[in-house]
Amino acid sequence: MKSISLIAVTLALGSTTYAASIPKSARAAETSSTFDYYNGTCTSEKVRIRKEWRDLTGSEQKAYLAAENCLISLPAKSGLAATTNRFSDLQALHRGMTNTAVGDIIHDVGQFLPWHRYYMHVHETLLRQECNYTGPLTYWDERLDADTGDMFTSPMWNSTGFGGNGIGSDGCVVDGAFANYTEHIGPENEDTEYCLNRAWDNSWAVEMANSTVIYDICGGYNTYSPWWYCIAELAHKGVHTAVGGVMADIKSSPGDPMFFMHHTYIDKVWFDWQKGDPTSRLYQISGPAINESANAEPAGGYPNTTLSYVLSSDEILPNVTVETVMNPMGGYLCYDYLT
Ligand SMILES: *[C@@H]1O[C@H](CO)[C@@H](O)[C@H](O)[C@H]1NC(C)=O
Ligand SMILES: *[C@@H]1O[C@H](CO)[C@@H](O)[C@H](O)[C@H]1NC(C)=O
Ligand SMILES: *[C@@H]1O[C@H](CO)[C@@H](O)[C@H](O)[C@H]1NC(C)=O
Ligand SMILES: *[C@@H]1O[C@H](CO)[C@@H](O)[C@H](O)[C@H]1NC(C)=O
Ligand SMILES: *[C@@H]1O[C@H](CO)[C@@H](O)[C@H](O)[C@H]1NC(C)=O
Ligand SMILES: *[C@@H]1O[C@H](CO)[C@@H](O)[C@H](O)[C@H]1NC(C)=O
Ligand SMILES: *[C@@H]1O[C@H](CO)[C@@H](O)[C@H](O)[C@H]1NC(C)=O
Ligand SMILES: *[C@@H]1O[C@H](CO)[C@@H](O)[C@H](O)[C@H]1NC(C)=O
């Protein structure tokens, strides 16, 4: 799992025709824009503000964890294999998207970020509609911790939060709001009973998620394909691997409620990048729509991800196009991030 080195990624990116030269000024660009993102039905009165875990009050934190546990307490509805509760519908949906007729259509493809943005919205919709959650959606600002050199210092890992590292030979998580949760989906394509588990690797996390990676290495790209690939391979994959256990499972990782803290953060990193040059980046999409190594080339050539590519959640919510989710304040979606 830890075979991806920065050097390999940098070389791979450098060898594509996308290679971009851009001043390393992403930090300044993020805050300098006066672009008006509100569109369609999304207005300043309606916009929901997503907040970092540490920006929630204690009672907001409790309410979020309770809503997640509410999904766990409700019956499954999707009809997908091996589901045992509403939360597991989301896990099965994610795994299903890695096992389509053309292989995994949510990782290593251009729609990786749009699909996961949509998936975060599906998760949020279930929390609100089925568990009456009214608070802000939340995320883990991984950069904050990576830059201190201690990735697991945030109070979100405490025994009233998401719980800490796994213990014992199975690495089971035995404290926190999801202590001793039993998984039924996974590992990978198996359906077995096992504990929610983690196996932290601090130094890997710090190397993959710090500000140098976000701003200087990935932030140096001003076109979507190399930027997306850099974030996906480093910050995204790196933290999956470094939290470890269920989170390190490319198929069944949404079985750790942490998954949604991680991917909402990755979504924020994307929106921050879009905000760096909204005129050019807000609707910029590219990349292969299928795994080209796993599929024979179709007659018309390998398909690319476009704004009209259709994202599916196996009918949990209606299908939408990539275009619909490109702007988080575009109408179908209506959220921003506090910081
Ligand atoms: C607003 O929506 C229109 C129509 O779909 C689209 O052409 C335009 O790019 C959108 N603007 C923003 C800022 O999302
Ligand atoms: C959500 O609120 C509705 C209306 O008050 C209620 O019927 C329902 O049981 C609540 N759902 C949960 C999971 O608490
Ligand atoms: C966990 O952290 C939160 C702050 O994010 C704090 O309110 C809570 O008391 C902490 N719990 C424990 C057991 O330390
Ligand atoms: C989880 O299981 C462990 C080991 O069996 C036990 O010590 C712990 O009390 C359990 N935690 C909760 C919150 O049930
Ligand atoms: C931040 O990440 C870069 C790239 O992985 C690494 O070279 C550097 O040592 C990291 N910085 C710290 C303070 O860990
Ligand atoms: C893409 O296909 C190759 C070759 O079959 C495989 O090794 C790789 O894991 C696939 N990537 C994903 C994300 O499924
Ligand atoms: C997909 O994009 C690549 C790289 O930009 C391009 O070479 C190829 O022709 C595109 N494929 C199709 C079917 O348009
Ligand atoms: C949603 O999209 C998926 C994938 O393209 C497709 O298989 C499915 O038929 C679509 N569902 C509807 C209701 O259009």
Image (cartoon, helix red, strand yellow):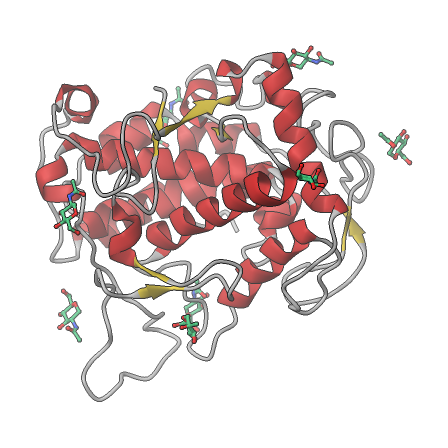
Task: Say which residue appears at 81% left-offset and 57% top-offset.
Answer: 193
Which one is nearer the viewer's eye here, 315 or 33?
Answer: 315
Which one is nearer the viewer's eye here, 52 or 248?
Answer: 52
Considering every residue shown, the one lying at the far bottom of the view is 299
Indicate left or right for 140 with 15 as reference: right
Above or below, comparing residue 203 to residue 153 in the picture:
below
Q: Quadrant of the C terminus?
A: top left
**Residue 319 visible in image:** yes
Which one is nearer the viewer's eye here, 222 or 119?
Answer: 119
Task: Say which residue appears at 63% left-offset and 62% top-offset.
Answer: 188
Above or below, comparing residue 319 to residue 31 in the picture:
below
Q: Measuring from the top left, give residue 233's x and y in whole percent.
A: 38, 47
Q: Measuring from the top left, give residue 179's x and y in whole percent.
A: 78, 34
Task: Say which residue appears at 70% left-offset and 27% top-offset.
Answer: 164
Q: Measuring from the top left, give residue 16's x and y in whole percent.
A: 16, 57
Ligand 7 sits in which quadrant? bottom left
